[in-house]
Amino acid sequence: HMLWGYPKWIVPAAGVAQGLICWAAFASEPKRFLAQKMLAALMGGCIHTHVRVAGKLTDAIGAIGFLIVSMIVAWLHHHEDPIAVVAIHLGLAACGYTAAELARTHFGRPGGGILRGGASGFWG
């Protein structure tokens, strides 16, 4: 089955991304630095799913919160310029949002929605 019009492989791919982010967050530099950037892109995809696909801004509050925390950590822990932190993290979140839209529209089943049945194989 499809979930929100995404192909079925998107869930394990997002899980792998989350695992890499967790690993990198506790690793040495520069992996920690990269983890904050990866988190921003992933949260952009999460925001897309909640706002654009499910149509619920309130469900995206957690993803928005994680995005803000990643900015705070980059600023306080990595001593990055606050203006650059906001610009870079919002840019990466926009990339994640766009990637989620592309995954849904180009890899997802046309007309896919929340658990639409009947798909098989790679799309099902």
Image: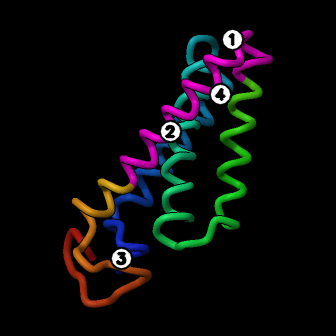
The residue that mark 3 highlights is 2
Q: Is residue 47 above or below residue 56?
A: above
For residue 26: magenta?
A: no
- The image quarter containing residue 7 is bottom left
Residue 113 in view: yes
Residue 22 place in picture, x, y as percent? 62, 36
Which label sits in the foreground, 2 or 4? Answer: 2
Residue under the image location 31 percent in, 56 percent down: 103
Q: Quadrant of the N terminus?
A: bottom left
**In the drawing, does residue 37 fall left or right of residue 105?**
right
**Mark 4 or mark 3: whose residue is earlier in sequence:** 3
Residue under the image location 57 percent in, 46 percent down: 43
Which label sits in the foreground, 3 or 2? Answer: 2
Start-end of magenta stretch: 74-100
Which label sits on residue 81? 1
Distance from Cα at disc 4 to Cα at disc 3: 31 Å
